[in-house]
Amino acid sequence: MRIAFWGCVAFFCVLAAGRLQAQQVLTIEDCRRLAVENNKRLKIADEEVKASALKKAEAFTNYLPGVEGSGVYLRNQKKINLLEEDAYLPVGTVENGSFTFRPDQLMTGADGTPVAVNGQYVPKDYALLPKDAMTVDDRNTALLQVGLTQPIYLGGKIRAYNQMAGLSEKLARSKRSQELQEVVLATDEAYWQIVSLSNRKKLADKYVETLQKFVHDVELMLETGVATKADVLSVRVKLNEGEMIRTKVENGLSLSRMLLNQLCGLPTDTLVTLVEEVDDACMEEVGEEDLERVYARRPEVASLQLAVDIYKKKEKIALSEYLPKVAFMANWVWTAPSFYDGISTKLSGMWSVGVGVQAPIFHWGASRKSLRHAKSQTNIMRYQLQEAKEKIELQVSQAEFKMKEVERKLSMARKNMERAEENLRFANLGFQEGTIPVLNVLEAQTAWLTANSDWIDARIDARLCKVYLEKAYGTLGENMD
C-alpha cells in the first residue's frame, strides 16, 4: 500500500511538472495576433467591409438594363355588352363620302313615291346586328407584361452613386484599420501592465523576504538585550505592510492576466507566461516622422477625407435633380381577351419600343435647397478633417515630448536605484556592526523599495510611450492586416 501510494504521488508530481513545462510562453506579437484573431469588433469591421464591397457591386448594376415582369388575372362577374339588344341597320349607299339612299332602297307608297315618317324616308331593307356579336366575354381577364429599361442619362446620378459606393468601401477598410489599432493598443497596455505587476511581485517577494530575515535578526538581538521591544514592533509593522503590498500586487496581477486572456480570446483562467516576465528584452527606438506622412497613415484622417469625398458625390446627386433624365424602354404585352384581330378570348400581344425623357420644371426650389444642404454637409466634414489634423499634430508633439521625458526619467530612476542599493548595503553593514539603529535600516529598505518601484515604472512607461508614439504616427499594428 505504501509503495502504491508513493507511486501515485510520483506520477502526479511528474504530471504537474509536465504541465508547468508545457505552460505557454507568449511574446507581445503572439498576444497581438491572438487579440486580432478573436476580437469581436474586428470581426464586425470585417463584415462591414464585405457589406460595402457587395454594395459597390450592387451600385454597378445601375449601369445595366433592368428587366421586369408583371402579371394580373381577374375573374369578372359579367360580360361586356356593347348593345342592349339586337340592332337593325338600314341598308343604304355611300356616295361622295356620305351615307344616302337610292330610290330603289326606299319604301314606296301606292303612287310609287318614297314613304316618309316625321320627315325621314323609310328604308326598304335592314341589316341585322346581333347583340351577341357585340358582346365581349371578359369574365376571365389576364394581363402579362415584360419591360426592359436602359438608363441613358440621369444627370450623372448613376456615376456618382458608383463612386460613392467605392468610397464607402474604402471608408469601411479605414475604420477597420482604426479598430485594429485600438485592439493592438488595448492589448499592449494589458501586456505591459502584467509585466509591470510581475516585476513588482518579484520586488515585493524580495522585500518581504528581506524583512522576514530582519525580523529574525532583531528578535535575536532582543533576546541578547541589544534591541528593544519597540524595534521588534517597528520591524513587524513594516513586514505587515510589505505583505499587504504583495497581496495587492498579486490581486492586481491576477485581474490583469484575466483581462489579457479576454483580449486574446483565451479562457480567463488560462495561465500564460509573458517573455518580458523572464527576459527584459531591449526596446527598439522609434524614429521621428514627417507630419504629412503621419496624416497619410492615420486612419482617422483617411476616414474623414473619404467622408468629404462622399459628400461631394452627394452634391452631384443633388445637382442631378436639376437635369433631364433619358432612358430607353422596350415592352412586351399580352392580354386576354385581345382586340388585335377582332375580339378573341385567346392570349395575344405585341411589343413596343421607345425613348422616355423627364425634366424638372418647377418644384418650389426643392432641388436648390437639397443642393445647398449637401454643400453644407461637405463643409462640416472639411472642418472636422481640419480639426482632426490639428489634434493629431498635438498628439504627435505630446507623444514625442513624453518619449524624451521618459528617457530622462529612466536615467534618473537607474541612478536612484543604484544609490538606494548602496545606501541599503551600508545600512545593513552598520546595523550588523551596531552603529546604525533599526529605524535607519527600515528607512533604507523603504527607500530601496521605492527606488526599485520607480525603476519598474520608468521601464514600463518607456514601453508604453513607444506604443503611444507608434499610435500617434499611425504605425501601430501596420503589419497585422
Image: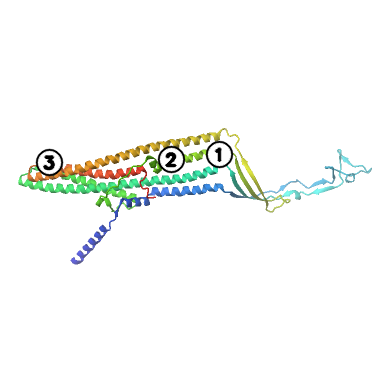
At label 2, the amino acid type is Leu
Task: Report helix, strand or loop for mark 1.
Answer: helix
In x, y percent, where is residue 472?
35, 42
**Which residue is at 18% across, 66% downward?**
2
**Residue tagged by mark 3?**
440
**Residue tagged by mark 1?**
320
**Which residue is at 47% across, 48% downward?**
51
At label 3, the amino acid type is Asn
The quarter of the rendered structure image containing the N terminus is bottom left
Label 1 Cα crowd, 10 Å radius (few <14 / some 14-19 / many 20+)? some
In x, y percent, where is residue 13?
22, 61
Q: CA distance from mark 2 to mark 3?
A: 61 Å
Out of 68 and 392, give the one closest to the viewer. 392
First in residue order: circle 2 vs circle 3: 2
**Residue tagged by mark 2?**
304
Residue 415, picture quadrant: top left
Numbered tag placed on residue 287 in the rendering: none
Label 2 Cα crowd, 10 Å radius (few <14 / some 14-19 / many 20+)? many
Label 3 Cα crowd, 10 Å radius (few <14 / some 14-19 / many 20+)? some
At label 1, the amino acid type is Ser
First in residue order: circle 1 vs circle 3: 1
Closer to the camera: disc 2 or disc 3? 2
* Residue 358 in view, yes or no: yes
First in residue order: circle 2 vs circle 1: 2
* Residue 237 in view, yes or no: no
In x, y percent, where is residue 384?
42, 37
Task: Report helix, strand or loop for mark 2.
Answer: helix
Q: Is 367 situated above or below 92?
A: above
